[in-house]
Amino acid sequence: MKSAAIGLRIHSGWGALVAVAGVNGAQEIIDRRKIIVIDPKAAGVAQPYHFIEEMELRDAERHLSKCASDSKRLAVEGLREVSAKLSDRGFTLAGAAILLSSARPLPDLDEILGSHALIHAAEGEFFRHAFRQALERLEIPVTGIRERDLDDHARKTFGKDATEVHQRIDGMGRLLGPPWTEDEKTAALAAAIILNGH
């Protein structure tokens, strides 16, 4: 089995996933997809903290708990499918990277609900946490990399080849076709960093 790694850049209700194989500057994109971790028809799940802003604390906690459980289950299903498809093609997942924000640790729920900025931060953290729990459940080693530190990690991992690796990943959209946005590029670089660390 050949080693592969996945990178994830998370948004409200979904994550952009890119799977990478090959090391030492010979990265190959072997899978990319959007993993949706909410039921789009359910109320208040895409932005759970916005939805509970005016609720009593107990009801708010109940809603968050249900959303968290559902999102984790959907993340497990999506990631299990990726892992199985890669395994069928002869790849084993060496690890995963989740891109993190630079936000400070979150306060208690009542304080979060009193600040619109904290509500946004909490929602980002909420879905990153769902993916992290899913990866842990599937026993895929997971590393968090702050997005603003990604270039530093690339330099430490690839040394003088970091710029070339970066440029190659940026240009892969020409071969792969769309989507190849900032989501896919940063997820792919994070995955390559994880893979080269093994």
Image (cartoon, grey):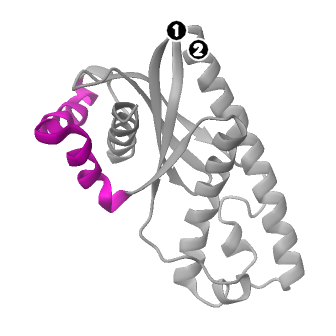
As helix, strand or loop, the secondary structure at mark 2 comes to: helix
* Residue 168 located within the stretch drawn in magenta: yes
Determine which residue is flagged by label 2.
87
* Residue 155 located within the stretch drawn in magenta: yes
- Quarter where residue 45 is shown: bottom right
Where the C terminus falls, by quadrant?
top left
The span shown in magenta is: 147-174
- The answer, for residue 39, to whether it is visible in the render is no
Q: Residue at x 69, y 83 (%)?
A: 108
Q: Is residue 130 above or below residue 173?
A: below
Q: Image check: 174 left or right of 60?
A: left
Task: Give the numbered dot on residue 166.
Answer: none
Coordinates of residue 94 in the picture (x, y in percent): 50, 28
- The answer, for residue 77, to whether it is visible in the render is yes
Q: Main secondary structure of the magenta part?
A: helix
What amino acid is labelled 2 in the image? Ser
What amino acid is labelled 1 in the image? Gly
Q: Image check: 54 left or right of 83?
A: right
Coordinates of residue 58 in the picture (x, y in percent): 89, 80
- Local packing at callout 2 (Cα closer than 10 Å; few below 14, some 14-19, many 20+) is some
Count up the numbered dots: 2
Q: Image check: 135 left or right of 89?
A: right
Which of these two is toward me, 22 or 71? 22
Task: Give the numbered dot on residue 90.
Answer: 1
Distance between mark 1 and mark 2 Cα atoms: 5 Å
- Local packing at callout 1 (Cα closer than 10 Å; few below 14, some 14-19, many 20+) is few
As helix, strand or loop, the secondary structure at mark 1 comes to: loop
Which of these two is toward me, 130 or 59? 130
Coordinates of residue 172 in the picture (x, y in percent): 25, 28
Q: Is residue 180 above or below residue 83?
A: below
Disc 1 + disc 2, Cβ < 8 Å = yes
